[in-house]
């Protein structure tokens, strides 16, 4: 009924009048993506998978770079036994490129070994010798993790960046520069990938102290915002892979039909596993490990297990693979359909108790009809409406996953963003050209649809790279691309598929720079719904300009920590050299 | 040399009193570095300054806790035995053991926040059991662990626990049925040390750049126990019965540990099971033993042992310490410029060489010079005198037996130049269990923390005073010298144990008992030579904790707050003003058919007025309050309502007087009313 009204309403393409004010507010500011995020893994830092990135390489666009980070909040001066990867742990990076086949198409497995070159000292490095010297084996499986082939043997992990005496000093230390240690540890796998495993600056940024003090992000009352991961290191596994090796049919990116070619979508996730049984021995000797490998940590989309899954189910979530998520929908689905964070963006719930998020207000009455607040029905009232025919919400196309029933309002946006990716179909196109009807065809801006139902970081590898030094580059990622597609006359004059800067940004993959905390909070605040034409409550149906104050509030929302505390490198492995023990601290 | 030392070298003393540090046992061994919950980082034992009839024992666990480590903040772990052990009678085996085990519950498993609406997740409580004389453990206390000090919203705020943190913290102090005061909870890490410098090949103090306290701003999980001395003394005697301040019957040895069950099984549903007997995975007695004395190849084994079953092979790390290599110009001394002021006696009294692998006092044995001293082979000489193991006379007993009040372990004061003669007593913490423990003579009076004489140099400072201060250096009488209650006679929170131990490795204790530095000529007038002054002046650059200590139990300071100055790199950020919802543009017709009507009474009003509104059909109603400039100052209401008449009270007490507009919005209609606050 409402759809009928809309189709009669003539809404012009959105004018750029208000674009300027919205856009200029976008630069400037962070949350640990999955640092100590679940009770059990918080107590096992070596196996704690903290972040995952997947992006088309800016300096080599025929390749995609995958970065998995482990071991949270490493203090650079954490001697005498500095942080490194652990033994008896399988660190894995998984790629799915074909939703029709359950399971990984490619699995990279890293295992680490430590040796003491001089067991007679308590120092980590002395006289050219290094203790806890770490090497790795990288194995690859292309048959769903059944058979593995070693593609790197004796890969080198650089030593901890202790200080000038231990590293550069030729008499007492290693007599080399730290940069050369990093460079010389970059390996080329027998299968062609470029690989780095070692310490790095933690590329993530977030005001941990503020956000976990009941959502005080940005901090209120004049307090400074703080990057809780500043000056900390982490251990990264970086893999640069030719796109044709990731594409399901071995095609190079030059073969893509267009920049949103559905055949170029990959889903990436990472994990850590330990043997089921560890037995301590009485004399302090190495524990024995036995039994099947059990997954203890995983990561796909940032912040899922940090701020979406509640504490009671975090450990279980870490133990599951994405391929098990769909079967657990009865337990985990509701955390996305009715997310806890949305309670804090809703004046009828706890919105008043979280003043920092006052700029984020979930649509309760979008287009005068749709309530996306927790417990609301969202678009569920459209079930059976002929208007759905041919859209992604058509049960004949994707079944009932997107509209599973009443009282699950975010089944149309948050759940698919995390679990299926978003197809280039109505309603998942920008409102540009929709003439007021969100279910109409609009301007394409994303296609990372890989409908396997599991939490993964999904990247369409055909989307061109936004240069990091381009003035249009934005840490707001796809949200920025949506803003441009709605408001910039270069893009908002037609529904033609165009490359809009930052279409290669989160949640289409994840770049190191992407401010995923801000983007996800905006997404919970309904920004994706708005982008596809389900405007905020203060938009009057039929009015010329949907860029209302509530939309501006959402777009302006920022946690205040919008960028990493150091730069990124222009080339592989992109993450920055680890902080030196003697150069940080207070 | 026959003269008692004169005070002409008081200048040395003033150099000694202030400044510099190393994590005592933080991430010190490869295996335990990967099991932070079970990592025992420090141990303290001191006579309570505010209650000298009691001794306070403090064991710290879980290193490097960043205060903002949410969403799952740091705490003690489950399935771990945290134990504090006391030995008091010289017979191997604990005489008292305190065992703490912790349990966590989620009061609200539906949130990812740690604290919300008065509920706390991972809320931790404990049971304290006590065993006496190796007997069965009985529960003497149950208690709560204070929550993490997350921030003002979680702790003091109405959406949090609504209680000041200090109240929450103080409320967790409990009294055991056996009389001890107990605190288990988060605290500031009381230790201080330039970790980055010391582990960059001994660059302590740093030779370029500022020294930094690597434990600054970090928290730790603390177990503090305050025990009446009569409960610790082997015969149940109160301290008032001590015959003197070095009474041998008042010595305790303290150590702490953690144990885990041997078998950990990870289950595929995200849970973990534990089974099997408990195995010790971490221990600490003397600070820095496993950090800077035991080499990496033996550290894990050291953690698995007890003071009652030490591996004798490890004694070699004390009798020829690795650190000694860096204080000896014939070895690696030249490669560690930071420690240049520390040079071990290679030719003390032109006779004795304490360089690694040399003989130290071993020649005395051949001349039977140890008769009548602790070095007498009929007493302890076979243990203390070892050929090629020069530090068997000082470092080994300091860590493994304690030091008796017998020659040669008395100050040179009154010895007339003979180090083996009777001198001035300064320590007696001799408890000959051949194992690493923190040994405390409880009869030594506490030095008030606010006394000008109080020094973080502990017993080294007492020795300096006993040698050079005319109040003490004229007789061999047993005097109470300030800081005799300091490390290594027990350990106070303030004691700069890194500095003291580095000085000890470089021979300061040998010098104190008359085995002077190489630049003193035997028989010369003044043994306070430049080399001695150099050692006494040595300082790591970090000599005190980064915050204060409390004057009462548990003495450690409340933990750093997760939102405070320690919670990350600050940025200036000004949040944009929150814009009021765009008013409806539909116009008059909308109002004419308004689905919502609004009124207010009283109007004008003082602080509170009631807004009445009528809803025509079911839907979402929002009412906002704007000031005269159009700025939204309050959301009065935003929720779904069925048709009917409603009243909502508006508390405007926080707003200035003036005119306001309340706007009710429902769908595409809205209605406004002007209200005035007087």
Image (cartoon, rainbow, N blue to C red):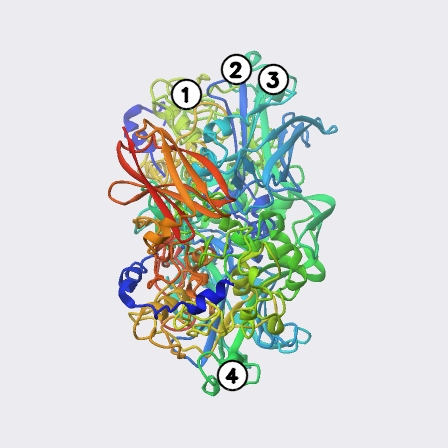
The outermost residue toward the bottom is: A255
The mark closer to the camera, 3 or 2, is 3
- Nearest the camera: B542 or B275? B275
* Residue B230 tag number: 3
Q: CA distance from mark 1 to mark 2?
A: 19 Å
Label 4 neighbour load within 10 Å: few <14, some 14-19, many 20+: some
Reading the image, the residue beneath label 4 is A244
* Residue B448 tag number: 1
x, y percent for residue A295: 64, 60
x, y percent for residue B482: 41, 22
The mark closer to the camera, 4 or 3, is 4
The mark closer to the camera, 1 or 4, is 4
Label 2 neighbour load within 10 Å: few <14, some 14-19, many 20+: some
Label 1 neighbour load within 10 Å: few <14, some 14-19, many 20+: some
State how many labels appear: 4
SS for tag 1? loop
């Amino acid at each position: 009924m409402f759809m009928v009204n809309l189709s009669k309403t003539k809404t012009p393409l959105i004018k750029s009048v208000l674009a300027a004010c919205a856009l200029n507010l976008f630069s400037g500011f962070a949350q640990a993506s999955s640092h100590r995020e679940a009770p059990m893994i918080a107590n096992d830092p070596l196996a704690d998978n903290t972040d995952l990135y997947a992006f088309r390489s800016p300096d080599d666009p025929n390749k995609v770079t995958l970065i998995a980070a482990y071991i949270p909040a490493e203090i650079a001066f954490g001697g005498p036994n500095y942080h490194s990867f652990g033994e008896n742990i399988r660190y894995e990076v998984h790629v799915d490129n074909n939703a029709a086949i359950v399971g990984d198409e490619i699995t990279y497995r890293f295992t680490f070994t430590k040796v003491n070159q001089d067991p007679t000292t308590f120092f980590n490095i002395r006289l050219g010798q290094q203790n806890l010297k770490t090497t790795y084996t990288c194995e690859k499986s292309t048959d769903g993790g059944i058979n593995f082939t070693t593609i790197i043997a004796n890969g080198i992990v650089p030593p901890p960046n202790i200080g000038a005496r231990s590293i550069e000093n030729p008499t007492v230390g290693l007599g080399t520069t730290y940069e050369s240690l990093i460079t010389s540890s970059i390996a080329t796998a027998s299968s062609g990938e470029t690989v780095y495993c070692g310490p790095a600056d933690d590329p993530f940024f977030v005001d941990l102290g503020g956000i976990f003090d009941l959502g005080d992000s940005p901090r209120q009352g004049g307090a400074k915002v703080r990057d809780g991961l500043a000056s900390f290191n982490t251990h990264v596994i970086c893999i640069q892979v030719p796109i044709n090796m990731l594409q399901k049919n071995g095609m190079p990116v030059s073969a893509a039909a267009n920049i949103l070619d559905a055949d170029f979508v990959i889903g990436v996730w990472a994990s850590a596993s330990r043997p089921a049984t560890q037995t301590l021995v009485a004399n302090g000797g190495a524990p024995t490990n036995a039994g099947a490998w059990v997954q203890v940590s995983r990561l796909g989309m940032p912040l899922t297990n940090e701020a979406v899954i509640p504490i009671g189910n975090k450990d279980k979530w870490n133990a599951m693979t994405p391929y098990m998520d769909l079967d657990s929908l009865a337990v985990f689905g509701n955390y996305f359909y009715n997310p806890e964070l949305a309670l804090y963006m809703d004046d009828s719930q706890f919105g008043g108790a979280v003043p920092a998020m006052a700029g984020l207000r979930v649509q309760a009455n979008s287009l005068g009809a749709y309530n996306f607040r927790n417990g609301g029905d969202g678009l569920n009232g459209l079930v059976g409406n002929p208007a759905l025919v041919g859209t992604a919400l058509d049960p004949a196309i994707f079944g009932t996953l997107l509209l599973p029933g009443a009282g699950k309002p975010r089944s149309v946006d948050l759940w698919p963003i995390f679990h299926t990716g978003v197809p280039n179909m109505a309603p998942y196109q920008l409102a540009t050209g929709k003439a007021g009807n969100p279910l109409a065809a609009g301007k394409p801006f994303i296609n990372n649809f890989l409908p396997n139902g599991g939490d993964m970081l999904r990247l369409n590898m055909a989307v061109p790279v936004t240069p990091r030094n381009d003035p249009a580059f934005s840490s707001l990622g796809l949200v920025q691309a949506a803003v441009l597609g709605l408001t910039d006359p270069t893009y908002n004059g037609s529904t033609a598929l165009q490359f809009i800067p930052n279409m290669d940004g989160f949640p289409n993959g994840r770049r190191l720079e992407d401010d995923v905390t801000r983007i996800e909070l905006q997404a919970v605040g309904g920004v994706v719904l708005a982008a596809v034409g389900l405007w905020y409550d203060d938009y009057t149906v039929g009015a010329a300009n949907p860029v209302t104050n509530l939309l501006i509030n959402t777009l302006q929302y920022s946690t205040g920590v919008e960028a990493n505390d150091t730069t990124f490198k222009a080339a592989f492995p992109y993450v920055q050299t680890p902080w030196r023990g003697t150069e940080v601290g207070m | 040399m026959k003269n008692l030392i004169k005070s002409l070298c008081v200048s040395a003393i003033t150099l000694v009193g202030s400044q510099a540090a190393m994590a005592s046992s933080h991430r010190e061994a490869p295996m335990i570095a990967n099991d932070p919950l079970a990592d025992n980082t420090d141990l303290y034992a001191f006579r309570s300054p505010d209650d000298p009839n009691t001794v306070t024992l403090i064991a710290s666990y879980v290193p490097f806790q960043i205060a903002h480590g949410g969403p799952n903040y740091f705490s003690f772990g489950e399935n771990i035995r945290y134990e504090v052990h006391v030995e008091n009678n010289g017979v191997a085996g604990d005489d008292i053991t305190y065992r703490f085990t912790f349990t966590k519950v989620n009061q609200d498993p539906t949130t990812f926040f740690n604290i919300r609406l008065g509920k706390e997740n991972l809320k931790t409580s404990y049971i304290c059991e006590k065993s006496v004389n190796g007997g069965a453990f009985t529960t003497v206390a149950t208690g709560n662990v204070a929550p993490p000090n997350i921030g003002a919203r979680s702790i003091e705020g109405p959406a949090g626990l609504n209680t000041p943190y200090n109240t929450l913290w103080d409320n967790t102090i409990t009294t055991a049925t056996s009389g001890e005061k107990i605190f288990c909870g988060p605290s500031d890490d009381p230790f201080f040390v330039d970790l980055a410098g010391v582990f960059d090949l001994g660059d302590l103090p740093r030779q370029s750049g500022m020294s930094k306290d690597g434990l600054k701003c970090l928290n730790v999980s603390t177990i503090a126990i305050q025990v009446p001395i009569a409960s610790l003394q082997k015969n149940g005697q109160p301290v008032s019965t001590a015959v003197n301040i070095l009474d041998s019957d008042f010595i305790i040895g303290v150590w702490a540990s953690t144990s885990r069950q041997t078998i950990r099984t990870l289950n595929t549903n995200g849970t973990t099971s534990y089974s099997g007997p408990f195995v010790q995975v971490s221990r600490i007695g003397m600070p820095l033993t496993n950090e800077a004395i035991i080499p990496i190849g033996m550290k894990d084994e050291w953690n698995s042992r007890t003071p009652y079953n030490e591996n004798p092979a490890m004694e070699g790390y004390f009798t020829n310490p690795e650190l000694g290599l860096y204080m000896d110009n014939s070895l690696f001394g030249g490669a560690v410029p930071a420690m240049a002021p520390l040079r071990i006696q290679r030719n003390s009294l032109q006779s004795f060489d304490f360089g690694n692998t040399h003989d130290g006092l071993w020649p005395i044995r051949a001349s039977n010079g140890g008769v009548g001293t602790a070095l007498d082979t009929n007493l302890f000489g076979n243990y203390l005198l070892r050929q090629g193991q020069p530090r068997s006379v000082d470092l080994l007993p300091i860590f493994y037996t304690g030091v008796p009040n017998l020659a040669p372990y008395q100050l040179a004061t009154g010895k007339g130049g003979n180090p083996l003669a009777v001198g001035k007593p300064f320590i007696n913490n001799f408890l000959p269990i051949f194992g690493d423990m923190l040994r405390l003579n409880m009869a030594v009076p506490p030095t008030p923390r606010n006394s000008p004489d109080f020094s973080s140099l502990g017993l080294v400072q007492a020795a300096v005073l006993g040698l050079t201060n005319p109040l003490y250096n004229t007789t061999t009488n047993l005097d109470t010298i300030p800081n005799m209650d300091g490390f290594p006679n027990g350990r106070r929170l303030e004691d700069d144990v890194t500095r003291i131990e580095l000085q000890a490795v470089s021979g300061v204790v040998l010098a104190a008992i008359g085995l002077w530095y190489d630049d003193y000529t035997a028989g010369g007038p003044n043994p306070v030579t430049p080399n001695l002054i150099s050692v006494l002046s040595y300082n790591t650059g970090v000599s005190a904790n980064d915050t204060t200590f409390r004057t009462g139990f548990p003495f450690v300071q409340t933990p750093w707050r997760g939102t405070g100055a320690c919670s990350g790199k600050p940025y200036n950020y000004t949040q944009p003003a929150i814009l009021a919802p765009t008013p409806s543009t539909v116009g008059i017709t909308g109002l004419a058919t308004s689905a919502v009507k609004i009124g207010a009474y009283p109007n004008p009003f003082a602080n509170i007025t009631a807004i009445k509104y009528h809803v025509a059909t079911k839907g979402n109603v929002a009412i906002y309050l704007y000031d005269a400039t159009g700025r939204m100052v309050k959301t009065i209401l935003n929720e779904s309502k069925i048709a009917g008449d409603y009243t909502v009270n508006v508390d405007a007490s926080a707003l200035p007087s003036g005119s306001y507009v309340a706007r009710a919005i429902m769908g595409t209609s809205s209605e406004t009313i002007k209200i005035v606050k007087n």
